Amino acid sequence: MTLMRITSPHAHGPMSTSRVMQNVLLATIPGIIVLTHFFGFGTLVNIFWGSIVAVACEALALTLRRRPLGFYLKDYSALVTAFLLCIALPPYSPWWLIAVGIASAILLAKHLYGGLGYNPFNPAMAGYVILLISFPIQMTAWAPPRGVGELPGLLEALQACFVPSTFDAVTMATPLDLMKQNNSLLLEDLWAQNAQFGRWAGIGWEWANIAFLAGGAWLLYQRIFTWHAPVAMLASLSLMAALFYDGGSSASGGSPLFHLLSGATMFGAFFIVTDPVTSTVSVRGRLIYGALIGALIYIIRVRGNYPDAVAFAVLIMNFAAPFIDHYTQPRTYGHRDTRGEE
Amino acid sequence: MRKIFGFHGGIHPPENKQQSLRTPIADAGIPPQLVIPLSQHIGAPARPVVAVGDSVLKGQMIAGPAGFVSVPMHAPTSGNIVAIEDRLIAHPSGHLARCIVIASDGRDEWIEHSGAADYRDLDKADLINRIRNAGIAGMGGAGFPTAVKLSLKPDTRITTLIINGTECEPYITADDILMRERAQQIIEGTKILSQLIAPEETLIGVEDNKPQGLAALRAAAQGCALEIVEFPTKYPSGGEKQLIEILTGKQVPSGGLPLDIGVICQNVGSTVAVYDAVVHGRPLISRITTVTGEGVAQPQNFEVMIGTPMSYLLEKAGYRPDNNKRLIMGGPMMGFTVPTADVPIVKTTNCLLAPSETELPSPPPAQACIRCGMCALACPASLLPQQMFWFAQGKEFEKLEQHNLFDCIECGACSWVCPSNIPLVQYYRASKAEILQSRHDNEKSGHARVRFEARQERLEREDIEKEAKRAARKKAAEERALAAAQGGGEEDPIQAAIERAKAKKAAQQADAGAGEENEQEKLEKAVTTTRKRLDTASAKLEQARADGSDLVAALQTGVDKTRTKLEAAEKALHDYQQEHA
Ligand code: SF4
Ligand code: SF4
């Protein structure tokens, strides 16, 4: 009998990359439900079509790169990219917009750099920014929430996606747009004059953010990631908002609560900032990384030309992540100094 | 209550200790043949003092220590020496090593031996001698000679003596059962050690997953000046460095020893061996080994003679070969697989793990590293395993060393948590081996690298000097080419510095316009010497290429530089000749 020779360790923990990705997918469900409730079936159709394109692109890239299809498709990373990008896209996006976004994300941002684990930029956010720059009109057309405008039905949602020329989209400025464009009204009056505002932020947006927060908390509980980066991001965003809130004058940038529950804040904090591949690795590094993203989000939201800022802030910090890593290496056991300052 | 310090990282793998704790320690008996490797410890292999055909008694010394860092070997039972030859032993590399083979006679007849009536009357030298003569080497895993560890310089002050009863590896229960059944001996052994090294405090560290062992120790330690410290279970708290941090809050400096911070660690097994040696005069000829895993019908602990073939021991536990594809010496986290079950149990064999395929499945293919950082969170040495993996893949050894590869204790925590199933430790082990090998090669080739770097540096400096003077007079330039050429050579750095000083002086003199007469001669000489150097360097390069040495790149640069230098010297000579034609 010949015995197997392999080196230690011989045991392995319960975690697997596929499981990590599956958990991330599951954790998006509450947010998707809320988005669908408030904005209709648009997001679901986005995800449906986006997932098909994503798996096709992934398969294509793997084939071109001569990688075993089954083994790599099983890591679910393409689906995660599809879900994340499609959640970020406006509901009722046309099929080609979604396809271009997903193809950019998976072919350019991921496989061109060598595939999962080698991509310096978050694929979903890279795809998002490419779309935003190329098709600003389509990318800023957000539907009005339930109660403010008429919600299209499922059939109309499909029509909007696959035969966009026949669909008459109703769009409305998002609360973040209104906040940015406002320069004459006290916040109180801004709230009163626009039906999109809800209790703390925009109708629908506030609950979507809370739902993504819940999904994120569950992932945290599952130890899929650590709390450092998301908490640092939310804290610094709140701090920036608090500094410039000024009680709600016409020059105010909005309250901390408004920023926490607007746009892609919670989605970004728990599903984008926590993307392991493109963020920093050490604990200190993650605190810095998250905090800088939070600050950037505020600055771009209030001063920038685009409505939401999560994608830009994340991409900028993706770029900076290796440098942060370099300067935040932990102190090894038995060493007096941290490394990275050689 | 004593303050318990934590350590970074760590994991909680399933313990799987209950299986082998259901029955008390069993006697494995006398196998027909015992194979005793001469090297079961760190240090020089022991030297046989018996010959084939000799008959030996139980406890008789059969091999003596070969030097200070070495331990003797003793016959575990009475019988005849039937061979002294190379045999397969349990070693990660699966290699052959010299062994003494004893055919047992079944009488198990002891040689005359006696312990100290009262060890408190013995002085340090006497105690150490007894420990040395008993052939005790660290039984927790590494196998460092215990007597060497305990031989302190007279002025060494030990603050803490730590007896390690942690046994954090899953499956292994050898120390646990020892604490349950032989607590008194552990305590007595601890007292002996304590008397020997006179520490300020003596601690026995035990994880809180061994309540019975703890209770037994506490009962046995009543009224003794030692403290039994219980701390939360976490792998690898039994690692010497981690245990020291848990109990003292101090870290062993990188590359240093616990001794550097006034700490000495001993494993409970070794402590009992010390007790046996001092109190009963019994050498280390048997140990407690856990035999466990679904590949055996009755997992349990055995008192087994050193040299017993693993196959014999497995049979005792009801081996089910069809249920076992890999045999591990040690635990699932740090143990290594043995090539066959015919290798002998040695002084460091704390566990024989025969898992079934469902119990410890073969590793699935690795997926991409998603940089999730779980490995870094788990690493007890606070390393960045994912970065080291990256560098190990690219064979960037310098970066690996900068990331403190050599502080990795190979505990396997990173691999255990890695969701992508990357065999990280395997990469680190291979990289360490490669780095050590190349260090060794460098030393062998006569510190070639050091010499080379010194030379390289000098050549560069000369280039800079040259650059600075380029604007100077043409004649001076010619002189400098000459001087630089003279400054070369394969000598050592000090010699090089002297040469450099000489060259500089020569250049200065040349600048001042001195030594014009034999200008032509000097330039000619420069050309010849440089050409010679080029030849030597090229030859070396060829040699290095043939050997596949990693100095090829460095040598190549050297050759190129020398060639440039030769061209410069030739040009200088040519120019001079033109001018003075
Ligand atoms: S645990 Fe594995 S996948 Fe995660 S960062 Fe470490 S090596 Fe990469
Ligand atoms: S094996 Fe090395 S790198 Fe991995 S966790 Fe243990 S000490 Fe850290």
Image: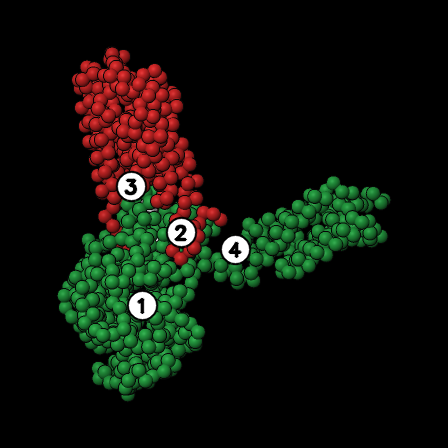
Chain colours: A red, B green
Label located before the other in sequence (1 or 4): 1
Residue that numbered label 4 is attached to: B549
Classify mark 4 as within 8 Å of ligand 2 or not, answering yes or no: no
Label located before the other in sequence (3 or 2): 3
C-alpha separation, residue under disc 1 versus residue under disc 4: 45 Å
Is residue B493 shown left or right of residue A252?
right
Q: What residue sits 30% from the left and 81% below the top?
A: B278
Image quarter for residue A19? Answer: top left
Is residue B375 shown left or right of residue B357?
right
Residue B336 visible to the viewer: no
Q: Please state which amino acid type lies under the numbered disc 2.
A: Arg
Q: Quadrant of ligand 1?
A: top left
- The picture places residue B314, in percent across and down from the top left corner, at 21, 67
C-alpha separation, residue under disc 3 versus residue under disc 4: 48 Å
Q: What residue sits 80% from the left and 49% below the top?
A: B512
Q: Chain of mark 3?
A: A
Give the numbered dot on residue B162: 1
Which residue is more in the foreground, B440 or A242? A242
Residue that numbered label 3 is attached to: A227
Q: Are marks 2 and 4 on the same chain?
A: no
* Callout in the foreground (2, 4): 2
Say few, some or many: other residues with alpha carbon within 10 Å of mark 2 (under 14 / 14 to 19 / 20 or more): some
Q: Please state which amino acid type lies under the numbered disc 4.
A: Ser
Q: Please state which amino acid type lies under the numbered disc 1.
A: Ile
